[in-house]
Amino acid sequence: MLLVDKRKGDLMPIHDVIPTPSVGLNRALGGGLNTGATHLFWGTPSVGKTTMCFRIMAEAQKMGYRPIIVDSESSYSDVYAEKCGLDISDVVVIQSTIVEDIMKSLIGYLTDDKEKHIFLFDSLSNIVKEEFYDKPEGGKAMGLSARSQGYFLQKLVNYLHKERNIMLFVAHQTVDLSGMYAITKAKMGNVVHHNMHNVIKLFLSMSKGEMEREPNNMITSQRAVWTIEKTKQLPTIGSTGYYYVLPQLGQIDTRRELIDIAIEMNIIVRKGAWYTYEDSKWNGMGAIELTDKQIKAIEKQIKE
């Protein structure tokens, strides 16, 4: 709960902005994800939903936020989390699918007014109330899953605070066959959608030209697309862009996306096959090698 009495001189809390690993997504959101808010990522398998969230958590950790991971899929790995930049010595992991158990484990962190936290629920689609397991398959159990998620979200949002926490959610995709055409959508109910500040869809581009393979045909890099389906931060609903997934490394190639955007904005100037930035010149896009100093300068130019 938050009470701000302006007559008494109370001030509204100020939120932090935590960057994502996608330069374009950060631009569309005004720098990144606002704290004191809920953010949902959903989409196709292997698109980097968990990787995206781990990278965001790693940035938040640098800003003093402690990562709390609710792993309802029992898939958390210290090795993978560390690859994504997380300091695993300060991570809390809760493995459960039952709303009541999760809330008992979380309540101390949700009400902590001395430490800042970033919460990840991966995935929301698996979290249900305890009574779900007492119902027969089908029938009431089908609707109970969506109601469980809505109930869970409504309890969580009571603890949101702009200066103390931020909540990330991952959801699976499902196919709605109720109409004339099959529609792909996030596996969540209307209450969940209503309680989200940002809903971001992630999906892989299936164009052969946007995949890179090794001689053994294994994919080493693939272009993925993000779309902002809902946002309360900026009037950018419907905005879309892309990033690069490195499947073998479980990473997102931020540097490559930065180069693409710099070329689109004419920060890196293209003339024929040659690319120029300040005193540096490269023959072919694949030859571009930026120093850390140049990367920081380009990031600043893109933000401006």
Image (cartoon, rainbow, N blue to C red):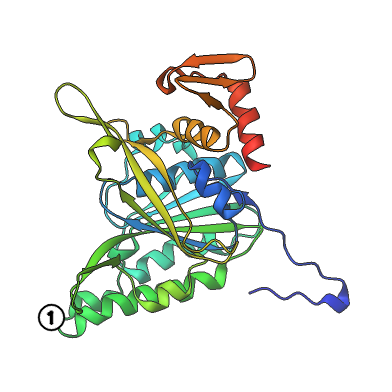
Left or right of 98, for residue 258: right
**Horizontal and vertical percent for residue 243?**
41, 41
Q: Residue at x 29, y 46 (%)?
A: 205
Amino acid residing under circle 1: Pro
* Extreme residue in the bottom direction: 140
Residue closer to the observer: 90 or 285: 285
Q: Secondary structure at mark 1?
A: loop
- Quadrant in which residue 35 is drawn: bottom right
- Quadrant in which residue 172 is drawn: bottom left
* Extreme residue in the right direction: 8
- Against 277, residue 45 (above or below) is below
**Horizontal and vertical percent for residue 158?**
55, 73
**Horizontal and vertical percent for residue 26?**
55, 48
Residue closer to the observer: 171 or 185: 185
In what quadrant of the picture does the N terminus appear?
A: bottom right
Residue closer to the observer: 199 or 154: 199
Is any atom of residue 91 visible in this view? yes
Q: Residue at x 25, y 50 (%)?
A: 45
- Against 17, residue 290 (above or below) is above
**Horizontal and vertical percent for residue 269?**
56, 26
Q: Residue at x 50, y 64 (%)?
A: 237
Is any atom of residue 247 visible in this view? no
- Read off the residue under disc 1: 136
- Against 165, residue 277 (above or below) is above
Residue closer to the observer: 150 or 130: 150
In what quadrant of the picture does the C terminus appear?
A: top right
Q: Residue at x 62, y 39 (%)?
A: 302
